[in-house]
Image (spheres, rainbow, N blue to C red):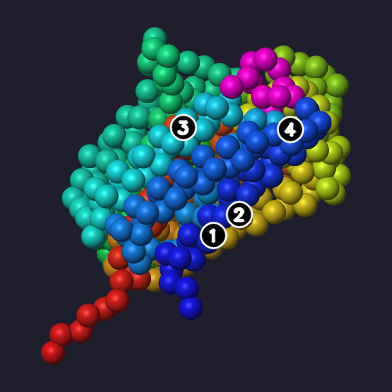
Amino acid sequence: MLGPRNRELLGLIPSALLVTAGFTAIFIQTQNKVSATSLTYGGAFLALCLATHIVIRRVTPHADPYLFPLAAVLASVGIVELYAISINGASAYAGVARQQGEWLAVGLVCFTVTIVALRDGRYMQLENYRYLIAIAGVVALFLPRLPVIGQQVNGAYLSVHVGSLSFEPSEFAKIAIVVFLASYLRDNRQLLVTAGNRILGITLPPMKQFGPLLLVWGSAMAMLLVTREIGTSLMFFGAFLAILYVATGRLSFPIVGLILFAAGAYYLGTHVSHIYARVLDWEHPFEPSLYHAGGGSFQLAQGLFSQADGGIVGIGFAQSLAPSLVPIPQSDMIYSVITNETGLLGATGLLVVYVLFVARGLKIATLARDSFSKLLATGLAFIVALQVFVIVGGVTDLIPLTGVTLPFVAYGGSSVVMNFVLLALLLLVSDRARQPIEYGF
């Protein structure tokens, strides 16, 4: 029977084959020949994965064997799709695949640094710095609103620019807030359950314990509203409710949270202009007055047309017009382009990989031996799940469209790097949870 690390090694082969096959298909369609370059790209991708696998084998030998191969499959889909976009899209998208490959290498370096620095249970020391981490996360969310370095894109303040470099602070903040929530609830969950006043059949937690939690979480949500990053706000809110429910076991907490969310969403959707505009676009994506407006529902409508045009099996990489017709195809709308080029089957396969990734993350949470690790793994897994739900739900018109990236797939350096840091934390929790227990006599 193969050990976990050998299963991980075999699991990396499909990702390298996807890169090779994807580039081969593109070269056949565009150049009418099979190019050895596709083997070069596939080999380079496999080499990066093997180097990372060796680090995992040495540093976290008991870690989950499936998470890294699943992330590699997602990254391979992103590389191939971004190359197809650079071929078929406007000149503005030229080079996005090369840049994504460079950020992938940086992400794997950060992944390696994280598991080496926090190995052997050292990630538990993050609990000692929870308030510092929380403050850093909240401050990071506010950076895009600062003059000079902050920049507004499509009505939202998402990124920070320093010279030729840019990054999205919310990618770091999502991990920082989860670390704080996991640490704080680990120490105070019993008081949140047993203490407090009972009103209308619901036990309200005491403010002494619940106050700091609400303060940090509320500050993060307020900063997100100031920067108009509504998709990330929804992601944080969902992760907060998930961790709170797992920590306390009280169903009343998420129920009250959902009621408050519904009330807040209704108020913001009817009183805040840019959110109201998003709601109108969601309700009437093909309304001519909205479709032709500046921005408006044009992006959403084009994405829906693109997905419908893909059919069951897609129309192929080189034959697709989606990259040139769908706004922001490399990040916000990459799922629509994938559906157009690979069809419903390809899009479904992508979502299945995400489901497996989240399932492994929740499996790690169930195996964790301490409360902090359990809550940390739960929060990180839900962050990925909610991020996929927000962006896929937006481009399919299930919910209003927001500018959240598709993890490991969409173009973006900060997203790629921080998602690999998230993956490293999950593997660290998994390694500690799956280590054999030594009994002394």
Which residue type carries mark 4? Phe
Q: Spatial distance from mark 4 to mark 1, Cα to Cα? A: 26 Å
Q: Is residue 12 left or right of residue 437?
A: right
Q: Distance of mark 2 from mark 3, alpha carbons?
A: 21 Å
* Label 4 vs 1, first from the N-terminus: 1
Secondary-structure class at tag 3: helix
Q: Magenta span has 88?
A: yes
Residue indicated by mark 3: 103
**Which of these two is toward me, 193 or 78?**
78
- Which residue is depicted at the point 46% across and 23% down? 159
> What is the distance, in whole Å, between disc 3 and disc 1 at their CAs?
22 Å
Residue, disc 1:
11
Write down the residue under mark 4: 27
Report the Cα–Cα distance between label 4 and label 2. Answer: 20 Å
Q: Position of residue 7 (x, y in %)?
A: 49, 66
Q: Name the residue furthest top.
A: 148
